Amino acid sequence: MSYELRDHTADVAVEATADTLSALFAAVADGLTAASAESVPAAGERFEFAVEAEGREALLFDYLDRLIYERDVRLVLPAAHRCEVSEPADDGDGWRLAASARGVPLDAVAAREIKAVTYSEMALERRVDGWYAYVVFDV
């Protein structure tokens, strides 16, 4: 899995690839962390959470939005992301994500505030060689 930060008209974008959808979500989240701080110390405790949504794109959006929320509520920079994406079951339940991150105290990093995740130009697709995502964040 990998990600790259991309310049985007007064915002920042993350472009990521991975072999699995779960690894892709984690790569985009790692990109969010990198967009927030140039260096991230090994400090912080892991925390867990879950997210549900009607579709894949909505799940990615809600996951990233939740990371920004956790940053604001816990006063930590979420880092070292782990997640497991579950497709809808035959009974019609939505997409689910079980996630964890290491919460690095904000006073331990020089963090740039990412205000929000956007749907602007969002891409989430399966390709021949794996999964691809492109996400723009409002800074």
Image (tube, rainbow, N blue to C red):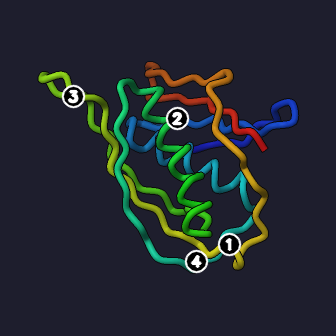
Q: Which residue is denoted by mark 4 in the rendering?
A: 42
The one nearer the camera, 49 or 81, is 49
Q: Which residue is denoted by mark 3 in the rendering?
A: 93
Residue 55 pos. (x, y %)? 38, 24
Query: What element does badge 2 sit on?
Result: helix
Residue at position x 27%, y 37% from top? 86
Mark 2: which amino acid?
Phe
Circle 2 residues within 10 Å: few <14, some 14–19, many ≥20? some
Mark 2 or mark 4, whichever is nearer to me: 2
Marks 1,4: beta carbons within 8 A: no
Left or right: where 134 falls relative to 11: left
Disc with the residue nearer the chain's start (2 vs 3)? 2
Query: What element does badge 4 sit on?
Result: loop
Mark 3: which amino acid?
Asp
Residue 136 placement: quadrant: top right
Disc with the residue nearer the chain's start (2 vs 1)? 2
Mark 1: which amino acid?
Leu
Image quadrant containing the C terminus:
top right
